[in-house]
Amino acid sequence: MVKRREIKILQLFTVIFCVFFLSCSHHVEKKLEAVIDDPKDLELPRKVADSLWRRAINAGDFKAYNEVSNNYWLLLKMPELYYYAQLMANRHECPEAYMDLYDMFSWEGTMNGIELAGKDSISRNQSLFYLLRAYELGEESALSYVHKEFGHRVQPPKSITYLKKIQKFYEEKK
């Protein structure tokens, strides 16, 4: 009889736990149903964004860069992101910054009536430099783009190859 009582108590606790868990998960789902009417609601407060950019660029903090750059992508703040990504790439060899630069150069959208995709040869070489540099620095997301650009079986060229093409382009313009 004692064993049966223990089973009943265990069943009761299980039922209580399930009810509690389901009520909590239902409460969380309601919070996620919120509608964002204004993209500004997603924007990081200016002080927070500035603090993250300072940590990223001045101290080479890749996690801070990731957090603030993802927010800028979400809000399509491309001109600012381009500038900060360039600084992170040049100063700290940040693989994610190189990948962001590649994405910006190869994005097929328009902004304020300006076609952003760099379809000219110099922009194309610049974007491939950024992609290969991200890949060389170990950016995981770059691998699928490298395969898309150069094929799965081909060893991709070194990023310096495209930097030399850019240099040659400007030398020929003289």
Image: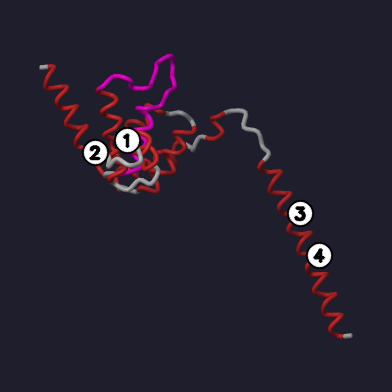
Give the residues in magenta: 94-121
Q: Position of residue 121 (x, y in %)?
A: 26, 21
Label whose residue precedes the other's in the sequence (3 or 1): 3
- Residue 32 within the magenta-colored segment of the rendering: no
Q: Is residue 13 above or below residue 86?
A: below
Q: Earlier in the sequence, mark 4 or mark 1?
A: 4
Whether pointer 1 and pointer 2 mark residues with C-beta atoms closer than 8 Å, the reply is: yes
Which corner quadrant holds the N terminus?
Answer: bottom right
Q: Amino acid at mark 2?
A: Pro
Rendered residue at 34%/37% (across/down): 151
Closer to the N terminus: mark 2 or mark 4?
4
Q: Secondary structure at mark 1?
A: helix
| Residue sitting nearer the eye, 63 or 172 | 172
* Mark toward the viewer: 2 or 3: 2
Task: Tell me the residue at 23%/38% (across/down).
Answer: 159
Classify residue 171 as left or right of residue 18: left
In this rendering, position of residue 169 left or right of residue 66: left
Give the label on residue 157, or none.
Answer: 2
Q: Which mark is residue 150?
A: 1
Give the numbered dot on residue 23.
Answer: 3
The residue to which callout 4 is attached is 15
Quote the CA–CA distance across marks 2 and 4: 61 Å
Residue 56 image-quadrant placement: top left
Q: Quadrant of the C terminus?
A: top left
Residue in front for this viewpoint, 19 or 157: 157
Assign a secondary structure to mark 3: helix
- 161 or 31, nearer to the observer: 161
